[in-house]
Image (spheres, grey):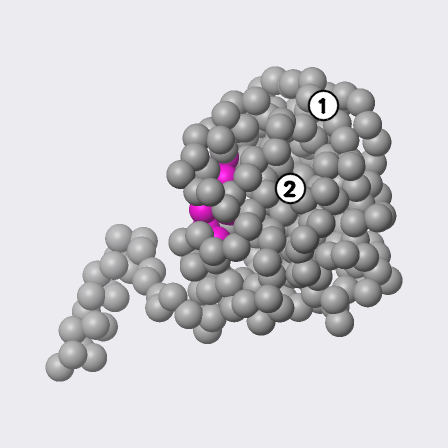
Amino acid sequence: MLKRSRQKIKKLLNAFGVEVHRYDPASSPSARLIAALQAFDIDIVVDIGANEGQFAKGLRAGGYTHKIVSFEPLAHAHAKLLENKRHDLAWQVHPRCALGDQHGEIELNVSENSVSSSVLPMFTTHSSAAPNSVYVGSETVPLTTVDKAVFPYLENAYAPLLKIDTQGYEWQVLDGALMTLPKVKGILIELSLVPLYRGQHLWRDCVDRLQAEGFELWSLEPAFLDLEVGRTLQWDGLFFRS
């Protein structure tokens, strides 16, 4: 009887476009990530490209209690980020800046949805799959490197994880992290299957580079899809030192 009732509820929810799963590693990408962080004793997550703090809030909702340090270049998103972390003493927000392979300033293209903003020009492959990702303006932002901005936060850490979500600019972020990477235990990075931004490196290049740095591909989760044709455009790739 209970099983039949559950099936009816599931069918009713599906009719409204809602699908409910248990929160466990077998059915939840978030639970899988939390399980991996626990397995490798990750004691600090560096959230590069934090936007308004959605990723960090997801970690907290999943039960991650250790330190988080967030980096975000957009002025409006950075202000929201500070607001969202204000009651969380283990979550720090670095002063507004972009991370790359040099120091100075850089022009950032601002997308309508904010999260798709990038230093790089966007291809129509991206904007066609997500019309609200089109650029609507630009901001000049401070630019620095992981080695300069992130490394000091890792002084007392024994198992840091870098999360890099910089919309095609991941390669340059890695170029600016040459001193930091040997101290890092894990990396969560966007891997594009097709060119979405002009000048970006695709998934094979990134996987090969991280493997050469001593990281093993641990898991892949779909991150960006063209729902009209059912095509996966981007994965989130999770790597740990082997």
**Residue 54 on the magenta span:** yes
Amino acid, disc 2: Ile
Quarter placement of the N terminus: bottom left
- The residue beneath circle 2 is 48
Image: magenta residue range: 52-59
Image x and y of residue 64, in percent = 48, 58
In which image quadrant can residue 172 be found? top right
The answer for how far apart the CA atoms under marks 1 and 2 are is 14 Å
**Residue visible at 73% across and 57% down?**
184
Image x and y of residue 37, in percent = 57, 64
**Residue visible at 76% across and 31% down?**
144
In which image quadrant can residue 106 be found? top right
Q: Is residue 48 left or right of residue 65?
A: right
Image x and y of residue 73, in percent = 63, 28
Say if mark 1 contacts mark 2, CB within 8 Å: no
Image x and y of residue 38, in percent = 54, 67
Along the line of sight, the residue nearer the viewer: 34 or 26: 34
Tell me the element at label 1: strand
- The residue beneath circle 1 is 142
Is the magenta region chiefly helix, strand or loop? Answer: helix
Tell me the element at label 2: strand
**Residue visible at 66% across and 55% down?**
157
